[in-house]
Image: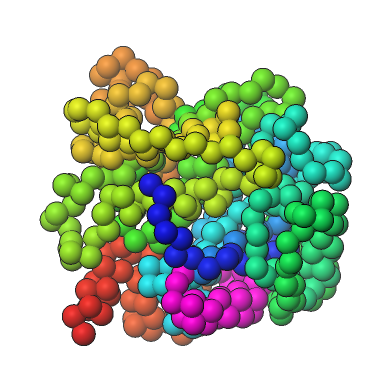
C-alpha cells in the first residue's frame, strides 16, 4: 500500500470561530482573503517543486465540545453545512486563482474541526494513559502535540486569530525541545478584524444523551476516482458519524468500512483511460482519512496495515488499525452492495444525495435477511451554486471550472484533453 511520497511537507492554517451565518458570502468575508493568500502561495511551491502540497485547515469552533456525550451521528448532521461551505469556498478560491486541487500536482486540502478543550487535560504532553482523541474533531492540545511536522503555520490578523495562535503555541511550547520542530509563522489578512461577540459566533448543534442512535461501525462506498472536495466531505461525514470513545466510560472497538469500486466495474466509465487504478484510489482515500483521523503523538503512534485476499465477491481488502480502538477497512467492491449485506455489525451507511436509491436497496437486502436496517445518513452534493447567493459574477465558464474541482468525470475529461494536446 505504501508508496513513494510525492508531497511536500504540509502547511497549517488556523481559522478562528466562524460567523453565525453559515453561508458562502459570510465565509468569503471571514476567510476568503486568507485562503486566497495561502492557497496561491502553496500552489507556487507545488509548481516549483513539481509535486503536490498539503494544507491542513483547522477550523476552531468555541461552542463545539470535544467531549459532547450526545450521539455523534446527531452532531455530525449539524456540522455538515459548516464543512460543506468551507470546502465549497476552497473550490471557489481555487477556481478564481486557477489553482488545481491535488489531481494536477497542486494543492491537497484537508479540513478538521477544533473543539473547545476546557476541562480536558493539563498542559502536559499526552500519554498512553488516556484514550486517543481522534479526528475529525480534536482540541488544540491534540493538534499541537501531534506527530505532524508542518513547514509553515498561518494565522489570521484579527483578535480572534491572535488568541487562537497564542493558545496553540502555549501547548506547543511545553513539548520537549526535541519535539519542537522549526515552524515558520505568518500572519495573513483576516476578514473580521475585531473580536466576535458570542452571539455573532457559530453555534454548534446540541445533542441529547437520551437519543439512542450511536454508531460504532459506519460504512461508505464510492469510486473515489481523482479524490476531490466532494469525496472529502463524504469521507469526513463518515468519520464524524462514528461514535468517539467516552473518556469516562469503557472503550469500544470502532470500525469504518470504505467500499471502493473495483476496476472491472469501471471499464464503461467516460474517459476510462484516465481512471485511476484501485490501488491508487485506495491510497488516496487512505491518506485523506489518516490526515483527518490520526493526531497521535510519537509515543502513541501505533498503525498497522494488513492486506486480505479471499475467493468470492468483495474478497480483496486492506485493513488499517489505528491503535487499539479504530479499524478502517478498505474493501474492493465487485457488486453494488459490498460488506453492507455481509457484515451485520455495520449500523449506518453514509451516502450522497445522488445515491439515495442505493441506500434503500441495501436495506431491502438486509431486512430480507432478518437484519436491522442501516441508519442512512445523507450528505449534500457540493455544487457551484448556492440557493441564496453565488460568489461574484459567475459565468457558465466559471461554473464549468468549479465542476472541474468536484467532479471525477470532469477531472478525467480535463486530463484527457491535456494529454492529447
> Residue 134's x, y, as percent?
62, 41
Q: Nearer the viewer, residue 305 or 137?
A: 305
Image position of 162 (left or right of 278): right
Give the residues drawn in magenta, as a range: 23-52
Quarter of the image for residue 373 reads: top left
Query: Looking at the picture, does residue 98 appear above or below residue 323?
Result: below
* Marker count (numbered): 0
Magenta residue check for 341: no
Quarter of the image for residue 40 reads: bottom right
Q: Nearer the viewer, residue 148 or 228?
A: 148
Is the magenta region chiefly helix, strand or loop? helix
> Residue 88's x, y, as percent?
49, 66
Query: Looking at the picture, does residue 75 appear above or below residue 100?
Result: above
Residue at 72% x, 47% y: name it.
142
Residue at 34% x, 61% y: name it.
226
Residue at the front extreme, as displayed: 178
Residue 416 seen in the current view: yes
Residue at the left extreme, as displayed: 268
Q: In the rendered image, which quarter contains the C terminus?
A: bottom left
Query: Looking at the picture, does residue 175 appear above or below residue 389?
Result: above
Magenta residue check for 50: yes
> Residue 54's x, y, as percent?
53, 65
Residue at 45% x, 72% y: name it.
51
Image position of 176 (left or right of 276): right
> Residue 228's x, y, as percent?
40, 61
Image position of 106 (left or right of 147): left
Residue 355 seen in the current view: no
Residue at 21% x, 38% y: name it.
334
Amino acid at each position: 500500500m505504501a508508496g513513494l511520497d510525492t508531497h511536500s511537507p504540509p502547511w497549517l492554517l488556523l481559522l478562528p470561530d466562524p460567523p453565525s451565518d453559515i453561508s458562502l458570502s459570510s465565509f468569503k468575508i471571514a476567510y476568503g482573503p486568507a485562503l486566497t493568500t495561502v492557497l496561491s502561495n502553496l500552489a507556487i511551491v507545488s509548481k516549483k517543486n513539481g509535486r503536490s502540497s498539503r494544507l491542513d485547515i483547522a477550523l476552531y469552533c468555541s461552542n463545539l465540545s470535544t467531549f459532547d456525550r450526545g450521539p455523534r451521528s446527531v452532531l455530525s448532521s449539524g456540522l455538515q453545512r459548516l464543512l460543506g461551505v468551507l470546502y465549497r469556498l476552497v473550490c471557489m478560491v481555487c477556481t478564481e486563482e486557477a489553482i488545481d486541487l491535488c489531481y494536477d500536482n497542486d494543492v491537497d486540502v484537508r479540513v478538521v474541526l477544533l473543539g473547545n478543550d476546557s476541562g480536558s487535560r493539563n498542559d502536559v504532553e499526552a500519554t498512553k494513559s488516556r484514550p486517543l482523541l481522534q479526528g475529525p474533531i480534536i482540541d488544540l492540545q491534540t493538534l499541537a502535540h501531534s506527530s505532524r511536522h508542518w513547514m509553515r503555520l498561518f494565522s489570521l490578523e484579527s483578535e480572534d486569530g491572535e488568541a487562537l495562535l497564542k493558545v496553540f503555541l502555549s501547548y506547543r511550547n511545553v513539548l520537549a525541545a526535541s519535539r519542537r520542530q522549526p515552524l515558520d509563522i505568518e500572519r495573513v489578512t483576516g476578514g473580521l478584524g475585531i473580536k466576535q461577540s458570542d452571539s455573532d459566533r457559530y453555534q454548534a448543534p446540541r445533542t441529547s444523551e437520551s437519543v439512542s442512535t450511536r454508531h460504532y461501525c459506519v460504512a461508505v462506498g464510492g469510486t473515489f476516482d481523482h479524490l476531490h472536495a466532494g469525496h472529502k466531505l463524504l469521507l469526513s461525514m463518515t468519520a464524524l458519524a462514528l461514535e468517539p470513545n467516552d473518556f469516562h466510560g469503557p472503550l469500544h472497538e470502532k470500525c469504518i468500512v470504505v467500499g471502493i469500486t473495483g476496476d472491472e466495474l469501471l471499464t464503461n466509465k467516460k474517459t476510462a483511460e484516465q481512471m485511476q487504478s484501485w490501488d491508487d484510489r485506495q491510497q488516496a482515500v487512505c491518506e485523506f482519512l489518516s490526515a483527518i483521523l490520526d493526531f497521535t503523538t510519537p509515543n502513541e503512534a501505533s498503525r498497522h496495515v494488513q492486506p486480505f485476499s479471499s475467493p468470492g465477491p468483495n474478497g480483496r481488502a486492506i485493513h488499517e488499525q489505528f491503535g487499539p480502538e479504530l479499524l478502517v477497512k478498505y474493501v474492493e467492491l465487485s457488486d453494488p452492495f459490498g460488506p453492507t449485506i455481509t457484515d451485520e455489525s455495520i449500523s449506518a451507511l453514509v451516502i450522497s444525495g445522488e445515491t439515495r436509491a442505493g441506500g434503500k436497496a441495501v436495506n431491502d437486502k438486509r431486512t430480507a435477511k432478518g437484519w436491522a436496517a442501516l441508519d442512512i445518513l445523507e450528505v449534500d452534493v457540493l455544487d457551484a451554486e448556492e440557493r441564496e447567493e453565488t460568489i461574484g459574477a459567475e459565468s457558465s465558464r466559471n461554473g464549468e471550472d468549479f465542476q472541474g474541482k468536484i467532479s471525477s468525470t470532469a477531472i478525467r475529461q480535463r486530463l484527457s484533453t491535456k494529454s492529447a494536446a
